[in-house]
Image: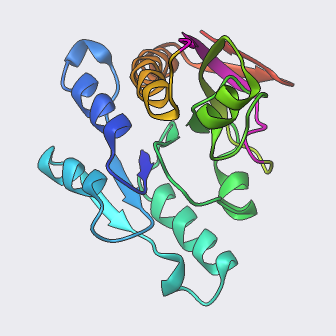
Amino acid sequence: MVLVSGSGSNLQALLDACGDPAYGAQVLAVGADRHGTYGVERAEAAGVATFVERVSDHPDRAAWDSALTAAVAAYEPDLVISAGFLKLVGPTFLEEFTDRYVNTHNSLLPSFAGIHGPRDALEYGVKVAGATLFFVDAGVDTGPIVAQVAVEVADDDTEETLTERIKQAERRQLVDVVGAMVGRGWTIDGRKVTIG
């Protein structure tokens, strides 16, 4: 199960991987928080079920959180992947999908959490940036880390060039690690995540 808010490039990488039977995983459905996303179009083109749960269609965030939880739970996913999903889920969703909801972030957490990871990394002057796949908890980019991939920062990098290289590494990591998680399972002991 994949949640998206935008173009769905990470989703497309997963859909492409799932096209190979040896990958061992499938995208059951794609959910979005808004209509008209290219991510939903990608899913529909691949013959994957889709749904939209907009916050504005509910009286408050708690009602939206419950509706999103029910929509996702209907597919009985082993793993829920936030692939550019730009909404923070609430306690109902987190309780239902504890230890099954992962997100990818464009920094090496816990450094540079939030929405400007590459920009903040460049401003700080780091020599290595990257991407982190982690389990979502009630904090912002604070859950147990599943995997990380490093990307060297070039002297002439701009936010755009660094972001693009991180996205490429992030997609490869997402596909590889999700395949491993689905194929071999995972355990979480405190903050330590073990695959297999």
149 left or right, relative to 134:
left
Quadrant of the snapshot with the N terminus = top left
Provide residue 181's location: percent of width, then percent of height: 52, 20
Q: Is residue 114 above or below residue 182?
A: below
Residue 138 belongs to magenta span: no
Q: Nearer the viewer, residue 87 or 121?
A: 121
Task: Using the rendered view, name the quadrant where residue 142 is placed.
Answer: top right
Q: Nearer the viewer, residue 106 or 35?
A: 106
Q: Nearer the viewer, residue 114 or 51?
A: 114
Extreme right residue here?
190
Quadrant of the snapshot with the C terminus = top right
Q: Nearer the viewer, residue 91 or 55?
A: 55
Provide residue 36's location: percent of width, then percent of height: 27, 68
Provide residue 38's location: percent of width, then percent of height: 25, 55
Give the number of marks. Answer: 0
Q: Is residue 47 above or below residue 17?
A: below
191 left or right, relative to 37:
right
Extreme front residue here?
156
Residue depicted at x 15% and y 48%: 47
100 left or right, relative to 6:
right
Q: Is residue 2 visible?
A: yes
Q: In the image, which residues are magenta?
A: 140-155
26 left or right, relative to 178:
left
Provide residue 182's location: percent of width, then percent of height: 47, 22
Residue 143 belongs to magenta span: yes
Q: Is residue 27 visible?
A: no
